Image: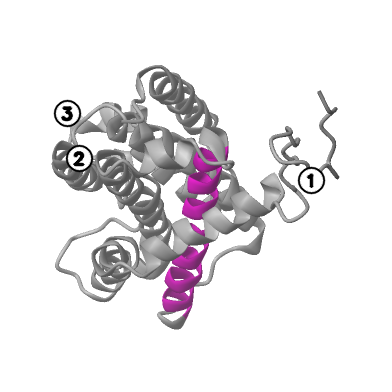
Amino acid sequence: MTSPTASSNVPGTLRPVPAPSTAGAASPRRRIVAQSAFEAKMILRNGEQLMVTILLPVMALVGLSQTSIIDLDTAGRSRIDFVTPGVIALAVMSAAFTSQAIATAFDRRNGVLRLMATTPLGRGGLLSSKIIGVLTVEAVQVVVISAVALVLGWRPDPVGIPLALLAVLLGTAAFTSLAMLLAGTLRAEGVLAVANIVLVLLTVGGAVLVPADQLPDALRHVALLLPSGALGEALRGAFFGATIPAFSLVVLLAWTAGLGWGAGKLFKWH
């Protein structure tokens, strides 16, 4: 029998199939960057998500700083200086937790996660893209909120800005882990309800907008153990005194480790 070669034109002979060219394949980094941009655009172009991540925090900022409907003990600071760190914490929670949990849950229900996990992006690349997408949205949030706050008279201490960024990163890790745990274990409709309810409860009683010591005694100590309270206290510490309470760091790291472990064990891709 004639030996098959790439140049053989004899009918009936075997011809080797050339290996697929990888010259045009995107690198893992480019895949992640492209998917991250897509994740961020999906949030910022969605009206409902835009309201939760941008509009509501800005409304809270303006309402709490420019009106006295809610009595606040500002400890000698202006209302805008007192309120802004908490509003930034609320924005982080809305993007890293509520928005991400709902989007991921519906992607899972619609089979998008299972499909994306089989692409060259892979599961690790998809999760990395979601985290980077969240950080991109948070960057937009911080810029918008800070711009509005500066117009309203906010004058942050520049020394506290790097510490505030650290607090945002730790808070993002904790709340993204919680979002993945919910999105990977509950039905999409359940995630929609639970995520919104949890956000409201943490906003009202989780030491986000006001310090834990201004909450009722029944909530004060519990709030400090929640990721919301730890994030709020960390941001206030950064902007008020250029320091982050060590206890808040420990709480955020503990929540991140526990929720991340749970999400890794229990997350279902379909």
Q: Taking 38 as reference, is 5 left or right?
A: right
Q: Which residues are magenta?
A: 125-150
Which residue lies under the disc numbered 2? 188
Secondary structure at numbered mark 3: helix
Q: Taking 44 as reference, is 206 left or right?
A: left
> Which dot marks residue 129?
none
Which residue lies under the disc numbered 1? 9
In the rendered structure, does residue 94 fall within the stretch colored magenta?
no
> Which callout, 2 or 3, points to the residue nearer the camera?
2
- Crowd tier of the residue under label 1, counting other residues whose Cα lies within 10 Å: few below 14, some 14–19, many 20 or above: few
Which residue lies under the disc numbered 3? 218
Query: How is the rendered protein coloured?
Result: one colour
> Which callout, 1 or 2, points to the residue nearer the camera?
1
Residue in the picture at 48% in, 60% down: 38
Residue 224: quarter of image: top left
Q: Is residue 63 visible?
A: yes
> Which callout, 1 or 3, points to the residue nearer the camera?
1
The secondary structure that most of the magenta stretch takes on is helix
Quadrant for the C terminus in the image: top left
215 or 139: nearer the eye?
A: 139
Q: Amino acid at mark 3?
A: Ala
The image shows residue 83 at horizontal and vertical percentages of 36, 61
Residue in the picture at 47% in, 31% down: 252
Q: Is residue 79 above or below residue 120?
A: below
Q: Is residue 153 above or below residue 90?
A: below
122 or 225: nearer the eye?
A: 122
Q: Amino acid at mark 2?
A: Ala
196 or 208: nearer the eye?
A: 196
246 or 143: nearer the eye?
A: 143
